[in-house]
Amino acid sequence: MKVTGQQPPKPGDITDVASGKSKEAERKGAQARALAKEGPAPVGNRTSLTTNKVKEVIQSTPDIRADRVAEVRARLMAGTYQVDADKLADRMISEAIEEDLDRS
């Protein structure tokens, strides 16, 4: 009997019945776990300099903008601080939608 048009299965096509994963998928998963244990890859000098610069800017920027706080506080005390209700509602809805999208 001669069978034509069929090829033997490739190693990645053979599926482990118990797990439902191919041997190739298992190998790739093992590689990914090994890389995760090693940590991040070394960074080149240019990227490293940029990263260091960003860190410096972040560290030198205060968490609280004292000038803005003083301005808002003064307006509150003077009774001149007004909130645009439509703008506030739009922002709240937009942020709620973004949070919902991030969860899904």
Image (tube, rainbow, N blue to C red):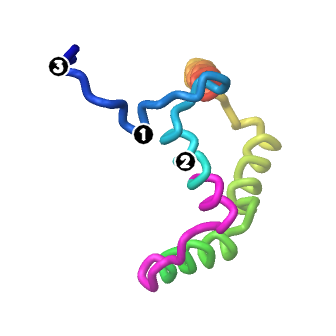
The reply to whether residue 15 is visible in this rendering is yes
Label 1 neighbourhood size at 10 Å, few (<14), some (14-19), many (20+)? few
Please give the name of the residue rendered at 60% of the width and 61% of the height, measured from the top-left corner: 35
Q: Is 74 situated above or below 5? A: below
Say which of 20 and 100 sits in front. 20
- The answer to whether mark 3 and mark 2 are in CB contact below 8 A is no
Residue bearing mark 2: 27
Residue 11 is labelled as 1
Q: Classify residue 64 by image quadrant.
A: bottom right
Query: Distance between the Cα atoms at labels 3 and 2?
Result: 31 Å
Q: Position of residue 77 (x, y in %)?
A: 82, 43
21 to 61, vertically: above or below: above
Quadrant in the picture for the N terminus: top left
Q: Nearer the viewer, mark 3 or mark 2?
A: 3
Q: As drawn, which residue projects farthest toward the front?
A: 1
Residue 84 at least partly seen: no
